[in-house]
Image (tube, rainbow, N blue to C red):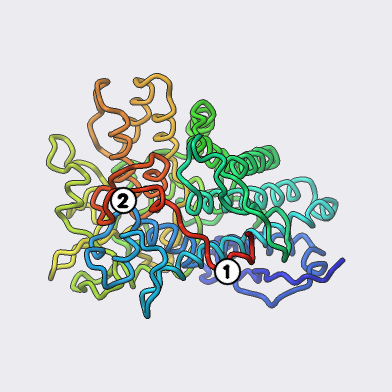
Amino acid sequence: MKQYRILILGGMMAAASMLGACSKWLDVTPKTQMKEDEQFSSRQGYIDALFGIYQRSAADSLYGNNLSFGLVELLAGRYENKAGTGNWYGQLARYNYTYNATGLNVENEIAEIWATSYACIAQANYILRNVDNGKSLLGEQAYRIIKGESLALRAFLHFDLLRLYAPVPGPANDAQPAIPYMDAFTIMPKERQSVAQILTRIEAELLEAEELLSVHTDIDQIANNQNSTSGDLFLMFRQNHLNYWAVKALLARMYLYKGDKPNALKYAQEVIASNKFRLMTAADVVSTDPAAIDSDLTLTREHIFSIYVSHLKRVSDNIFKAAVSFNDDGRDLYNTQTKINTMFEASMPGYGTDIRLPVQARSFWTVATTQGNIYTRKFHADNERNVRQRLVPVIRVPEMYYIAAEASANPDDGLGFLNAVRSARGLPELASSTNLEAEIMKEYRKEFYGEGQLWYYFKRKNTATIPDGVGGTMTETKYIFPLPLDEIQFGK
C-alpha cells in the first residue's frame, strides 16, 4: 500500500472536569501526521479520523462562521453594515464574488470554502477506502456507524458545495455543469458533473448511510449539560454526529431541493414522528443570559445535527458584540431594531408574544446603547461550563416542519405543519385562507436568523428580490459562486 499521510485529529482531552465525557468527545487537539496503515490499525484510529472531519468542519471557512452566521447570512441580506461598498461585507452583499483588494478579499473567502470542504471530503475518502478492510477489527456496529457517517459527511459536504457553486435548481439547469464529485482520494483532477448527476450521487450515498446507521438510532443529547448515559464514548452525543435522523433530515432537504416533494414530505415526517426532537416553547427558555449555565439560545433540544465550535466565543465577541456599549468597528454584524421588528411583524395583533422577538424579558438580542445597533445573542459563549453555547446548528427540527408544509399536497395539511412551529413560538395559528408559500418564507426569515439557511431557501426558490438586500434584482449569476481560480486541484 502507498504510504499516504493523513492529518488526523485525536487525543481526547477533558477541558473541564465537570464536563467529563462530553469534553472528551467535543474537545480534540491536533496530532501529528500519521501514515495511513498506522492510522487504521486500531478502532480508535478510525474514530480519530472521523472526529477530525467534524473538527475541520468547525473552521471559520465552514460552519464555524461562513456557512452559518457569517458569509451566507450577508448574502441573504441579514445585516445592516452592508450599506457601503468600502468594506468586505458591502462587496459581498452586492454579489461581487471576485472582488480582491487589500483587506477586502471576497474572492479568497469563496475559494476557502471550496478548499476546506474538499479537504474534509478527502479525509472521508481516506476512511472509506480503508473501512471495509477494518470490519473485523471494528466490529459490526462501529463499522456500520463509521462507514455510514463518512458516507453521510461526504454527501452532506458535496450538497452544500452544490448549493453554493451550481446553478439554481430546476429542470432547466439539470444538465448544467456543477462541481466534481470526489469519491476517492486522488491527486488527479476530476471533471465536473452535472447538477442532476451530483444530486443522484448524493441521494445514493445518503440512502446507503441511512441503512448503515439504522444499527443505532438513539439520540444522546447535550440538552442539559450532563454527561451522556452511554458507556461508549463513540456513541455519546449523537446530535453532534451525522446520525441516523440527521441523514433522514438531509434526505428531506435534498429531495425538496431536487423538486421531489413526495419524498421530501416522507422523510420530514419520519423525523418529526420519531419524537427524538421537539419544538421548544417559552417554558423551555429558562434563561437567555449567555452567562447563565442554563442558557440555550440555539434551542439545542431541536438540533438534529450541530457542530461543536470550540473557538465560538472568539468569533462571536468579534462580530456580535458582547458589551452593549460597543459600536460598529467594521467587523461586527448588526441590524436595527426597526428592521427586526418589521421582520417579526411585531405590530400585528398577537405577534408580540413571539419568543424570538427582541424584547427585554427574553434577551435573545443585544442592543448597543450608543447607536441602537442590535445583535443576535445566539452564539455568545459566556459560560465556559455551558457546552450548549458552543454548538452551531446545521439542521434543526423546525426545518422539517417547513419542508413538510411546503411539500404537502393538501394546503390545509401544510398549514398544520407551519402552525405547529408558530404555536411553539408563541404566535397565533393562521387560517386556512393564508398564502402558505409567503408565510413559509416569513418563517424561514424569523426562525433561522444567523444560521445560514435563508440564502439556500432564496436560491432554491430563485427569489427575484432579497428582502433588505442591497444587490438589486437577483439573477442566476448572483446565485452562483465562481469556481476558485486554482480549482484544478480538485476538478476541471
Q: Give the left or right position of residue 79, taking residue 120 as reference.
A: left
Q: Residues within 10 Å of mark 2 (few under 14, many from 20)?
A: few
Mark 1: secondary structure: loop
Residue shown at 34% from the left, 20% from the top: 412
Given residues 444 and 361, the one toward you in this image is 444
Q: Position of residue 100 (x, y in %)?
A: 40, 73
Q: Residue 376, can we see it?
A: yes
Amino acid type assigned to the residue bearing label 2 in the image: Val
Given residues 112 and 21, the one toward you in this image is 112
Q: Which residue is mark 1?
A: 486
Q: Position of residue 101 (x, y in %)?
A: 37, 77
Q: Position of residue 244 (x, y in %)?
A: 60, 42
Total number of numbered discs in the rendering: 2
Q: Give the left or right position of residue 361, taking residue 311 as reference.
A: left
Above or below: residue 136 compared with residue 444? below
Query: CB under 8 Å between callouts 2 and 1?
Result: no
The residues bearing labels 2 and 1 have C-alpha atoms spaced at a distance of 49 Å
Q: Quadrant of the N terminus?
A: bottom right
Amino acid type assigned to the residue bearing label 1 in the image: Asp
Q: Which residue is mark 2?
A: 286
Given residues 336 and 32, the one toward you in this image is 336
Q: Quadrant of the C terminus?
A: bottom right
Residue shown at 25% from the left, 61% from the top: 375
Q: Position of residue 138 (x, y in %)?
A: 79, 54
Q: Give the left or right position of residue 303, taking residue 208 as reference.
A: left
Q: Quadrant of residue 70?
A: bottom left
